[in-house]
Amino acid sequence: MHMKQILVTGANGQLGSSLKERSRFYNQFEYTFIDFQDLDLTKEHQVQQFFEKRAFDYIINCAAYTAVDRAEKEREQAFSVNEGIPVLLGNLCRQRPVYLLHISTDYVYSGESWLPHLEEEDPAVTSVYAESKLKGEMSLWNNSRCMVIRTSWLYSEYGNNFLRNMIRLFGERSELGVVFDQTGSPTYAGDLAQALLDIIVYSENHGFKSGIFNYANEGVCSWYDFAVEIMSLTGSVCNVHPIRTSEYPLPARRPEYSVMDKTKIKSTFGLKIPHWKQSLITAIHNLNHSYEFRLP
Ligand SMILES: NC(=O)c1ccc[n+]([C@@H]2O[C@H](COP(=O)([O-])OP(=O)(O)OC[C@H]3O[C@@H](n4cnc5c(N)ncnc54)[C@H](OP(=O)(O)O)[C@@H]3O)[C@@H](O)[C@H]2O)c1
Protein backbone atom coordinates (compact mmCIF):
# COMPACT_ATOMS: atom_id res chain seq x y z
CA MET A 1 0.00 0.00 0.00
CA HIS A 2 1.21 3.52 -0.83
CA MET A 3 2.09 5.30 2.40
CA LYS A 4 1.30 9.00 2.29
CA GLN A 5 4.46 11.11 2.06
CA ILE A 6 4.94 14.17 4.27
CA LEU A 7 7.72 16.69 3.65
CA VAL A 8 8.72 18.86 6.61
CA THR A 9 10.78 21.95 5.77
CA GLY A 10 12.72 23.97 8.36
CA ALA A 11 13.19 20.60 10.05
CA ASN A 12 15.97 21.69 12.41
CA GLY A 13 14.04 24.65 13.79
CA GLN A 14 11.81 24.56 16.86
CA LEU A 15 8.63 23.40 15.17
CA GLY A 16 10.46 21.11 12.73
CA SER A 17 12.25 19.39 15.62
CA SER A 18 8.96 19.00 17.48
CA LEU A 19 7.43 17.45 14.35
CA LYS A 20 10.31 14.98 14.17
CA GLU A 21 9.59 13.97 17.74
CA ARG A 22 5.77 13.75 17.38
CA SER A 23 5.88 11.97 14.00
CA ARG A 24 6.92 8.79 15.83
CA PHE A 25 3.31 8.51 17.00
CA TYR A 26 1.92 8.88 13.47
CA ASN A 27 3.68 6.02 11.74
CA GLN A 28 0.93 5.58 9.14
CA PHE A 29 2.85 8.29 7.20
CA GLU A 30 6.36 8.44 5.74
CA TYR A 31 8.40 11.57 6.47
CA THR A 32 11.18 13.51 4.80
CA PHE A 33 12.77 16.21 6.94
CA ILE A 34 14.81 18.90 5.19
CA ASP A 35 16.48 22.12 6.25
CA PHE A 36 18.57 24.88 4.72
CA GLN A 37 21.68 22.72 4.32
CA ASP A 38 19.70 20.14 2.29
CA LEU A 39 17.90 22.63 0.07
CA ASP A 40 17.72 26.43 0.04
CA LEU A 41 14.01 26.84 -0.57
CA THR A 42 14.45 30.34 -2.01
CA LYS A 43 16.29 28.85 -5.04
CA GLU A 44 13.51 28.19 -7.51
CA HIS A 45 15.45 26.01 -9.93
CA GLN A 46 16.78 23.72 -7.19
CA VAL A 47 13.35 23.47 -5.60
CA GLN A 48 11.78 22.49 -8.96
CA GLN A 49 14.47 19.82 -9.46
CA PHE A 50 13.87 18.45 -5.95
CA PHE A 51 10.12 18.11 -6.55
CA GLU A 52 10.68 16.52 -9.96
CA LYS A 53 12.60 13.71 -8.28
CA ARG A 54 10.30 13.22 -5.29
CA ALA A 55 6.51 13.17 -4.91
CA PHE A 56 4.83 14.26 -1.67
CA ASP A 57 1.23 14.27 -0.51
CA TYR A 58 1.66 16.99 2.11
CA ILE A 59 4.22 19.70 2.86
CA ILE A 60 4.44 21.26 6.32
CA ASN A 61 6.37 24.47 5.80
CA CYS A 62 8.24 25.41 8.98
CA ALA A 63 11.06 27.17 7.10
CA ALA A 64 11.11 30.86 7.96
CA TYR A 65 13.22 33.89 8.69
CA THR A 66 12.36 34.34 12.38
CA ALA A 67 14.86 36.98 13.57
CA VAL A 68 12.11 39.52 14.28
CA ASP A 69 14.38 42.42 15.27
CA ARG A 70 17.14 41.76 12.73
CA ALA A 71 14.48 41.82 9.99
CA GLU A 72 14.12 45.58 10.50
CA LYS A 73 17.58 45.90 8.90
CA GLU A 74 17.49 42.77 6.71
CA ARG A 75 14.27 43.47 4.85
CA GLU A 76 15.37 41.76 1.67
CA GLN A 77 16.41 38.52 3.39
CA ALA A 78 13.21 38.44 5.47
CA PHE A 79 11.03 38.83 2.34
CA SER A 80 13.10 36.42 0.27
CA VAL A 81 12.38 33.65 2.83
CA ASN A 82 9.01 34.58 4.35
CA GLU A 83 7.36 35.64 1.11
CA GLY A 84 9.51 33.79 -1.44
CA ILE A 85 9.15 30.27 -0.01
CA PRO A 86 5.33 30.20 0.35
CA VAL A 87 4.99 31.73 -3.14
CA LEU A 88 7.16 28.95 -4.56
CA LEU A 89 5.47 26.16 -2.59
CA GLY A 90 2.01 27.52 -3.41
CA ASN A 91 2.86 27.42 -7.13
CA LEU A 92 4.08 23.83 -6.78
CA CYS A 93 0.73 22.92 -5.20
CA ARG A 94 -1.03 24.37 -8.25
CA GLN A 95 1.07 22.20 -10.57
CA ARG A 96 0.74 18.86 -8.74
CA PRO A 97 -1.52 17.12 -6.22
CA VAL A 98 0.24 18.13 -3.02
CA TYR A 99 -1.25 19.97 -0.04
CA LEU A 100 0.57 22.67 1.93
CA LEU A 101 0.26 23.48 5.63
CA HIS A 102 2.03 26.81 6.03
CA ILE A 103 2.85 28.38 9.40
CA SER A 104 2.26 32.06 9.97
CA THR A 105 2.12 34.38 12.96
CA ASP A 106 -0.08 36.33 15.37
CA TYR A 107 1.99 39.39 14.39
CA VAL A 108 -0.25 39.82 11.33
CA TYR A 109 -2.97 41.10 13.71
CA SER A 110 -2.90 44.74 14.70
CA GLY A 111 -2.94 43.99 18.43
CA GLU A 112 -4.86 47.16 19.09
CA SER A 113 -8.25 45.66 19.87
CA TRP A 114 -8.60 43.93 23.26
CA LEU A 115 -10.69 41.05 21.97
CA PRO A 116 -9.31 37.71 20.73
CA HIS A 117 -8.45 38.03 17.04
CA LEU A 118 -10.54 36.23 14.42
CA GLU A 119 -9.14 34.87 11.16
CA GLU A 120 -11.34 37.11 9.02
CA GLU A 121 -10.11 40.33 10.64
CA ASP A 122 -8.21 42.76 8.43
CA PRO A 123 -4.50 42.27 9.11
CA ALA A 124 -2.40 45.23 10.25
CA VAL A 125 1.35 44.80 10.63
CA THR A 126 3.81 46.80 12.70
CA SER A 127 7.19 45.29 11.69
CA VAL A 128 9.16 44.08 8.67
CA TYR A 129 8.96 40.49 9.94
CA ALA A 130 5.15 40.70 10.23
CA GLU A 131 4.89 42.33 6.80
CA SER A 132 7.02 39.60 5.20
CA LYS A 133 4.98 36.84 6.87
CA LEU A 134 1.74 38.49 5.78
CA LYS A 135 2.92 38.75 2.17
CA GLY A 136 3.81 35.03 2.31
CA GLU A 137 0.45 33.90 3.60
CA MET A 138 -1.47 36.24 1.25
CA SER A 139 0.01 34.34 -1.71
CA LEU A 140 -1.78 31.24 -0.39
CA TRP A 141 -5.17 32.67 0.58
CA ASN A 142 -6.90 31.69 -2.65
CA ASN A 143 -5.10 28.42 -3.20
CA SER A 144 -7.43 25.47 -2.55
CA ARG A 145 -4.48 23.17 -1.82
CA CYS A 146 -3.03 25.44 0.89
CA MET A 147 -3.82 26.10 4.53
CA VAL A 148 -2.34 28.88 6.69
CA ILE A 149 -1.96 28.25 10.42
CA ARG A 150 -1.20 31.33 12.51
CA THR A 151 0.51 30.69 15.82
CA SER A 152 1.94 32.79 18.66
CA TRP A 153 4.72 32.88 21.29
CA LEU A 154 6.19 29.55 20.19
CA TYR A 155 8.51 27.77 22.62
CA SER A 156 9.90 24.29 22.96
CA GLU A 157 12.81 22.28 24.32
CA TYR A 158 14.70 23.12 21.09
CA GLY A 159 16.57 26.17 19.84
CA ASN A 160 16.31 29.72 21.04
CA ASN A 161 13.06 30.65 22.76
CA PHE A 162 11.54 32.38 25.80
CA LEU A 163 11.44 29.27 28.01
CA ARG A 164 15.10 28.47 27.48
CA ASN A 165 16.16 32.12 27.71
CA MET A 166 14.33 32.60 31.02
CA ILE A 167 15.85 29.47 32.56
CA ARG A 168 19.31 30.66 31.51
CA LEU A 169 18.72 34.19 32.84
CA PHE A 170 17.35 32.92 36.18
CA GLY A 171 20.69 31.13 36.59
CA GLU A 172 22.73 34.23 35.69
CA ARG A 173 20.85 37.08 37.42
CA SER A 174 19.28 37.81 40.79
CA GLU A 175 16.92 40.40 39.29
CA LEU A 176 15.03 40.48 35.97
CA GLY A 177 12.46 42.84 34.45
CA VAL A 178 9.95 41.23 32.06
CA VAL A 179 7.30 43.09 30.06
CA PHE A 180 3.74 42.95 31.37
CA ASP A 181 2.02 45.19 28.80
CA GLN A 182 2.02 42.64 25.96
CA THR A 183 -0.69 40.02 26.23
CA GLY A 184 -0.84 36.79 24.27
CA SER A 185 -0.93 33.00 24.48
CA PRO A 186 2.23 30.90 24.67
CA THR A 187 2.26 27.90 22.33
CA TYR A 188 4.19 24.74 23.04
CA ALA A 189 5.61 23.59 19.69
CA GLY A 190 4.96 19.96 20.67
CA ASP A 191 1.21 20.70 20.83
CA LEU A 192 1.26 22.54 17.51
CA ALA A 193 3.20 19.68 15.88
CA GLN A 194 0.60 17.21 17.12
CA ALA A 195 -2.24 19.45 15.88
CA LEU A 196 -0.64 19.64 12.41
CA LEU A 197 -0.40 15.85 12.20
CA ASP A 198 -3.99 15.50 13.47
CA ILE A 199 -5.07 17.90 10.71
CA ILE A 200 -3.38 15.67 8.12
CA VAL A 201 -5.15 12.62 9.60
CA TYR A 202 -8.41 14.59 9.35
CA SER A 203 -7.64 15.55 5.74
CA GLU A 204 -7.05 11.92 4.83
CA ASN A 205 -10.48 10.97 6.21
CA HIS A 206 -12.61 13.98 5.36
CA GLY A 207 -10.76 15.94 2.67
CA PHE A 208 -8.43 18.94 2.82
CA LYS A 209 -9.69 22.26 4.16
CA SER A 210 -7.98 25.35 2.78
CA GLY A 211 -8.09 28.73 4.53
CA ILE A 212 -6.66 30.50 7.57
CA PHE A 213 -6.71 28.98 11.05
CA ASN A 214 -5.47 30.30 14.42
CA TYR A 215 -3.63 27.93 16.76
CA ALA A 216 -2.17 28.71 20.19
CA ASN A 217 -2.48 27.11 23.61
CA GLU A 218 -5.61 28.04 25.58
CA GLY A 219 -5.43 30.81 28.16
CA VAL A 220 -3.96 34.28 28.18
CA CYS A 221 -1.01 35.92 29.94
CA SER A 222 1.67 38.58 29.72
CA TRP A 223 5.34 37.73 29.18
CA TYR A 224 5.81 38.59 32.86
CA ASP A 225 3.19 36.01 33.96
CA PHE A 226 4.81 33.46 31.66
CA ALA A 227 8.22 34.13 33.23
CA VAL A 228 6.85 33.86 36.79
CA GLU A 229 5.25 30.50 35.94
CA ILE A 230 8.53 29.23 34.46
CA MET A 231 10.34 30.33 37.60
CA SER A 232 7.87 28.59 39.86
CA LEU A 233 7.84 25.33 37.87
CA THR A 234 11.63 25.13 37.62
CA GLY A 235 12.18 26.08 41.28
CA SER A 236 14.42 28.97 40.18
CA VAL A 237 15.15 31.89 42.48
CA CYS A 238 15.18 35.35 40.90
CA ASN A 239 13.46 38.63 41.61
CA VAL A 240 11.28 38.90 38.49
CA HIS A 241 9.43 42.20 38.24
CA PRO A 242 7.01 43.62 35.65
CA ILE A 243 8.23 46.35 33.28
CA ARG A 244 6.70 48.22 30.38
CA THR A 245 7.76 47.58 26.77
CA SER A 246 9.08 51.16 26.71
CA GLU A 247 11.62 50.16 29.40
CA TYR A 248 12.93 47.32 27.16
CA PRO A 249 12.97 48.87 23.70
CA LEU A 250 13.54 46.57 20.72
CA PRO A 251 13.85 47.47 17.01
CA ALA A 252 10.61 45.71 15.93
CA ARG A 253 7.28 46.80 17.35
CA ARG A 254 5.17 43.96 18.79
CA PRO A 255 1.36 43.83 18.94
CA GLU A 256 0.08 44.71 22.43
CA TYR A 257 -2.70 42.15 22.39
CA SER A 258 -2.13 39.11 20.20
CA VAL A 259 -4.58 36.64 21.74
CA MET A 260 -6.26 34.62 18.97
CA ASP A 261 -9.71 33.04 18.85
CA LYS A 262 -9.28 29.29 18.15
CA THR A 263 -12.92 28.36 17.66
CA LYS A 264 -12.47 27.74 13.92
CA ILE A 265 -9.58 25.26 14.14
CA LYS A 266 -11.20 23.41 17.06
CA SER A 267 -14.61 23.07 15.42
CA THR A 268 -13.28 22.25 11.94
CA PHE A 269 -10.82 19.52 12.97
CA GLY A 270 -12.19 18.47 16.36
CA LEU A 271 -8.93 19.45 18.09
CA LYS A 272 -8.56 19.64 21.87
CA ILE A 273 -6.09 22.36 22.84
CA PRO A 274 -4.34 22.24 26.24
CA HIS A 275 -4.08 25.28 28.53
CA TRP A 276 -0.67 26.96 28.34
CA LYS A 277 0.11 26.23 32.01
CA GLN A 278 -0.51 22.51 31.48
CA SER A 279 1.68 22.46 28.37
CA LEU A 280 4.44 24.37 30.14
CA ILE A 281 4.63 21.56 32.71
CA THR A 282 5.00 19.05 29.85
CA ALA A 283 7.62 21.18 28.09
CA ILE A 284 9.74 21.58 31.22
CA HIS A 285 9.50 17.87 31.90
CA ASN A 286 10.62 17.11 28.32
CA LEU A 287 13.37 19.72 28.50
CA ASN A 288 14.72 18.20 31.67
CA HIS A 289 14.83 14.80 29.99
CA SER A 290 16.43 15.98 26.74
CA TYR A 291 20.07 15.24 26.11
CA GLU A 292 21.17 18.69 25.08
CA PHE A 293 19.78 20.63 28.03
CA ARG A 294 19.78 20.30 31.81
CA LEU A 295 17.91 22.54 34.21
CA PRO A 296 20.28 24.38 36.57
N1 LIG B 1 9.05 31.49 17.23
C1 LIG B 1 7.90 32.10 17.46
O1 LIG B 1 7.66 32.66 18.55
C2 LIG B 1 6.83 32.12 16.41
C3 LIG B 1 5.63 32.75 16.69
C4 LIG B 1 4.65 32.75 15.72
C5 LIG B 1 4.86 32.11 14.51
N2 LIG B 1 6.04 31.52 14.25
C6 LIG B 1 6.22 30.85 12.95
O2 LIG B 1 6.32 29.45 13.20
C7 LIG B 1 7.14 28.84 12.19
C8 LIG B 1 8.21 27.97 12.84
O3 LIG B 1 9.00 28.80 13.69
P1 LIG B 1 10.27 28.23 14.47
O4 LIG B 1 10.35 28.97 15.75
O5 LIG B 1 10.26 26.73 14.45
O6 LIG B 1 11.42 28.78 13.50
P2 LIG B 1 12.99 28.47 13.56
O7 LIG B 1 13.33 27.71 14.79
O8 LIG B 1 13.69 29.77 13.30
O9 LIG B 1 13.20 27.50 12.31
C9 LIG B 1 13.13 27.96 10.98
C10 LIG B 1 13.93 27.03 10.13
O10 LIG B 1 13.83 27.46 8.76
C11 LIG B 1 15.11 27.28 8.14
N3 LIG B 1 15.28 28.13 6.98
C12 LIG B 1 15.49 29.47 6.95
N4 LIG B 1 15.68 29.89 5.68
C13 LIG B 1 15.60 28.80 4.89
C14 LIG B 1 15.71 28.59 3.49
N5 LIG B 1 15.99 29.60 2.65
N6 LIG B 1 15.58 27.34 3.01
C15 LIG B 1 15.33 26.31 3.84
N7 LIG B 1 15.20 26.43 5.18
C16 LIG B 1 15.33 27.67 5.70
C17 LIG B 1 16.08 27.67 9.25
O11 LIG B 1 17.36 27.17 8.94
P3 LIG B 1 18.66 27.96 9.47
O12 LIG B 1 18.57 27.96 10.95
O13 LIG B 1 19.80 27.18 8.90
O14 LIG B 1 18.52 29.35 8.90
C18 LIG B 1 15.42 27.02 10.48
O15 LIG B 1 15.87 25.69 10.68
C19 LIG B 1 7.68 30.00 11.35
O16 LIG B 1 6.88 30.13 10.21
C20 LIG B 1 7.51 31.22 12.23
O17 LIG B 1 7.36 32.39 11.47
C21 LIG B 1 7.03 31.49 15.18
Image (tube, grey):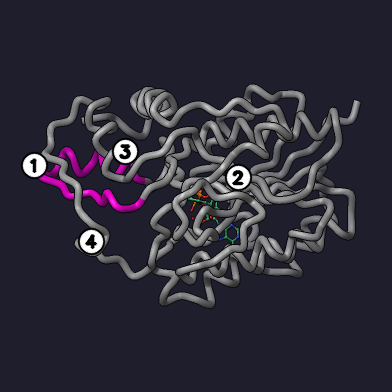
Q: Which amino acid lies under the numbered mark 1 shown in the image of this protein? A: Ser
Along the polypeptide, which appears first: circle 1 or circle 2? Answer: 1
Q: Which amino acid lies under the numbered mark 4 shown in the image of this protein? A: Tyr
Q: Which amino acid lies under the numbered mark 2 shown in the image of this protein? A: Asn
**Residue 76 location, x and y as percent?**
53, 77
Q: What residue did someone put label 4 on?
A: 248
Ligand 1 is within 8 Å of the C-beta of the residue at disc 2: no
Of badges 3 and 1, the one in the foreground is 3
User: Residue drawn 82% across and 51% down?
Assistant: 145
Q: Are marks 3 and 1 in contact (CB under 8 Å)?
A: no
Q: What residue did someone put label 3 on?
A: 226
Q: Secondary structure at mark 1?
A: loop
| Label placed on residue 214 | 2
Q: Secondary structure at mark 2?
A: strand
Q: Which residues are magenta?
A: 162-182
Q: CA distance from mark 3 to mark 1?
A: 18 Å
Q: Quadrant of residue 46?
A: bottom right
